[in-house]
Image (spheres, helix red, strand yellow):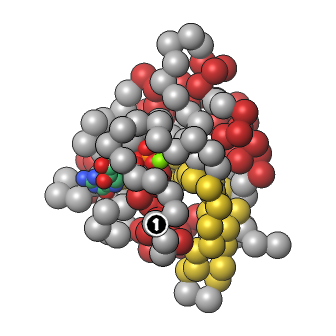
């Protein structure tokens, strides 16, 4: 069975950009308009000779109605099916209340999560990552999905012991 990697996070953090980079496609819509990815998107990625399945999600919306509604059913299913969850956050924006809501839900689901501090190009990687320690999901990994910086190291970590 292929390892399944799910990309989650609030809109506009760069999930679809990372999906396209990992899968070498333009299948996922990338846009400045938050919430454009409406359904789960599946694609194949490879780390060296190791293939994996990557799932882009668009179901996490910043909904003031309540924490439970932050997770759309499809996204929840994608997370449940995943071996690893990459929880993307925006290193330029810093951590937001939505990030904390999502983090709380992910902790509750008990999945193996890597916090990914995206958009870190041109920032000090250590402090860009440190901003997200308080999410309580371990050591954040800085990357730039548009430039590809740090993505190999991220996927090596994600595929360790799956
Ligand atoms: P999604 O809503 O999480 O799927 O986010 P998208 O992949 O659609 O990206 C949202 C916006 O962030 C787009 O304008 C991307 O070009 C931009 N973006 C994605 N990754 C990076 C990055 O590493 N650095 C910067 N500066 N912008 C990025
Ligand atoms: Mg998207």
Residue 159 image point, x, y percent:
63, 69
Q: Residue at x 75, y 72 (%)?
A: 2
Residue 63 image point, x, y percent:
52, 19
Visible residue check, residue 130: no
Residue 122 vertical placement versus 12 (above, below):
below
Q: Pick the residue in front: 39 or 21.
A: 39
Residue 24 image point, x, y percent:
48, 75
Q: Residues within 10 Å of mark 1 (few under 14, many from 20)?
A: few
Q: Residue lying at the far bottom in this picture: please name it.
A: 49
Q: Kindly indicate the quadrant of the structure image that contains residue 161.
A: bottom right
Check the picture and name the quadrant holding the N terminus: bottom right
Residue 46 vertical placement versus 159 (above, below):
below
Left or right: where does residue 131 sit relative to residue 106? left
Left or right: where does residue 106 sit relative to residue 86? right
Q: Residue at x 72, y 58 (%)?
A: 83
**Within 8 Å: ligand 1 and the Cβ of disc 1?**
no
Q: Residue at x 47, y 36 (%)?
A: 35
Q: Pick the residue in front: 120 or 18.
A: 18
């Amino acid at each position: 069975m292929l390892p399944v990697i799910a990309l989650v996070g609030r809109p506009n953090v760069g999930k679809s950009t990372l999906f396209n980079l990992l899968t070498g496609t333009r299948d996922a819509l990338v846009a400045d308009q938050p919430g454009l990815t409406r359904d789960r998107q599946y694609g194949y990625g490879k780390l060296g000779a190791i293939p994996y399945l990557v799932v882009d999600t668009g179901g996490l919306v910043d909904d003031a109605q309540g924490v439970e509604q932050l997770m759309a059913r499809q996204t929840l299913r994608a997370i449940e099916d995943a071996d690893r969850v990459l929880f993307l956050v925006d290193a330029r924006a810093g951590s937001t209340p939505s990030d904390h809501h999502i983090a709380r839900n992910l902790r509750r689901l008990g999945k193996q999560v890597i916090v990914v501090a995206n958009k870190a190009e041109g920032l000090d990687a250590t402090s860009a990552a440190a901003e997200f320690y308080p999410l309580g999901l371990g050591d954040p990994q800085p990357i730039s999905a548009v430039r590809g910086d740090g993505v190999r190291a991220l996927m090596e970590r994600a595929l360790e012991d799956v």
